[in-house]
Amino acid sequence: MTADAPLSFAPEVEAALKAGLPVVALESTIITHGMPWPQNLEMARKVEATIRDGGAVPATIAVMGGRIHIGLTDDSLQALARTPPDQAMKLSRADLAVCVAQGRTGATTVAATMICAALAGIRVFATGGIGGVHRGAEDSFDISADLRELAQTPVTVVAAGAKAILDLPKTWEVLETFGVPVIAYGQDELPAFWSRRSGIAAPLRMDSAAQIAAAANMRARLGLTGGQLVTNPIPPEAEIPRDEINPVIEQALAEAEAQGIAAKSVTPFLLQRIFELTDGRSLESNIALVLNNARLAADIATEMAKP
Ligand code: PSU
């Protein structure tokens, strides 16, 4: 840990880390920018409860009052969930320090959560879907900083794939170029966020939390920088199959283009439109996949905590 990083630990998280007990980091952009109120708060609470049920301590990460908070009280979680998206910064590597230095409120994306988790000594992090290469990136150059972070920060990220609004083949190509292990959990194909299948073969497959923990430990022993991405398929009963969700994604993308939506607004705009176009079904699926990822992350953290 950087000696003078302004981290404020929840007492339970600090105690668990000192005792070498399993801890799972959680991000906060999914709360402020990824889901509407009040489902965002319900999701955040359920994810924390799921991690506890799995025998680990949850540490939701956010920036408030000039400090990086590692673990939030229920009051803070609620305040964050009620913060309108335009009043919380959506933090990545580029703006994390600015937000802390200026004492502003910020929600951490996958990239910023990885940085904060590593500073705090947390090695596993659960989210919904990582950011990646946006469709049309050959013109816009819009590629999420999440990908570079996976290449440099030693945290195992459990997600249901990259969000299916992205260009998935290009996202996996970039991760391969960056040397990031992309692991499919329990199947040979990469999952596609709302759908279990993507039609893309997984570069690596693992079938147990113990294997994933062992691979992370070996990366550290080999001195390899960067993390691992574990792609965990959404449970069958919650999935929206590819041929159902794809036309909806196409429509949302066309609307985003017509309205000139760009940069950090693209992902929140698309998630909101897909929520409306599916009458809320995409949100139910999103919550189910996050909970599923929290369960696996708790198991991985438990394995990593074994001597
Ligand atoms: N997972 C979800 N919903 C989200 C996110 C993840 O189910 O909204 C957030 C994460 O914080 C991720 C961010 O880092 O979306 C990606 O945003 P962008 O595509 O703008 O990089």
Image: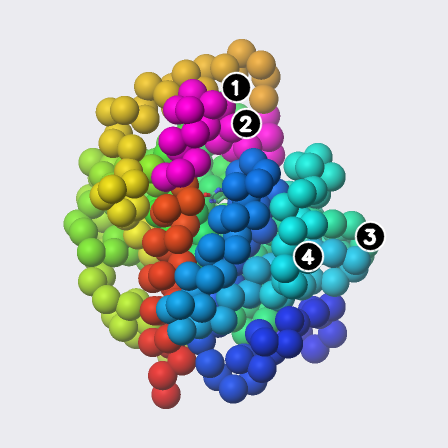
Amino acid at pointer 2: Phe
Give the numbered dot on residue 76: 4
Q: Which is closer to the viewer, label 4 or label 1?
A: 4
Up-down: is 124 above or below 11?
above
Residue 269: assigned label: 2
Q: Residues within 10 Å of mark 3 (few under 14, many from 20)?
A: few
Q: Amino acid at mark 4?
A: Ser
Amino acid under label 3? Gln
Where does the image place residue 306, in percent across and percent down from the top left?
36, 83
Q: CA distance from mark 3 to mark 2?
A: 27 Å
Label 4 Cα neighbours within 10 Å, binned few <14 / some 14-19 / many ≥20: some
Q: Residue at x 27, y 47 (%)?
A: 235
Q: Does residue 254 show up?
A: yes
Ranked by sequence position, the earlier of labels 3 and 2 is 3
Give the distance between the C-alpha atoms of the residues marked 1 and 2, in whole angstroms. Answer: 7 Å
Residue 94 percent location from the top left of the image: 66, 48
Label 4, label 1: how far apart the Cα atoms are: 32 Å
Report which residue position mark 3 lands on: 102
Q: Quick check: marks 4 and 2 in contact, CB under 8 Å?
A: no
Q: Which residue is mark 1?
A: 256
> The disc labelled 1 sits on which kind of residue?
Ala
Whether 6 is among the magenta residues is no
Q: Is residue 269 magenta?
A: yes
> Where are the magenta residues, as a range?
262-285
Vertically, is 255 above or below 266?
Answer: above
Q: CA distance from mark 4 to mark 2?
A: 25 Å
Could you tell me residue 97's position as x and y percent?
A: 72, 55
The residue under the point 59% across, 25% down is: 262
Give the residue displayed 58% in from the left and 82% down from the top: 15
* Dots 1, 2 in contact, CB < 8 A: yes
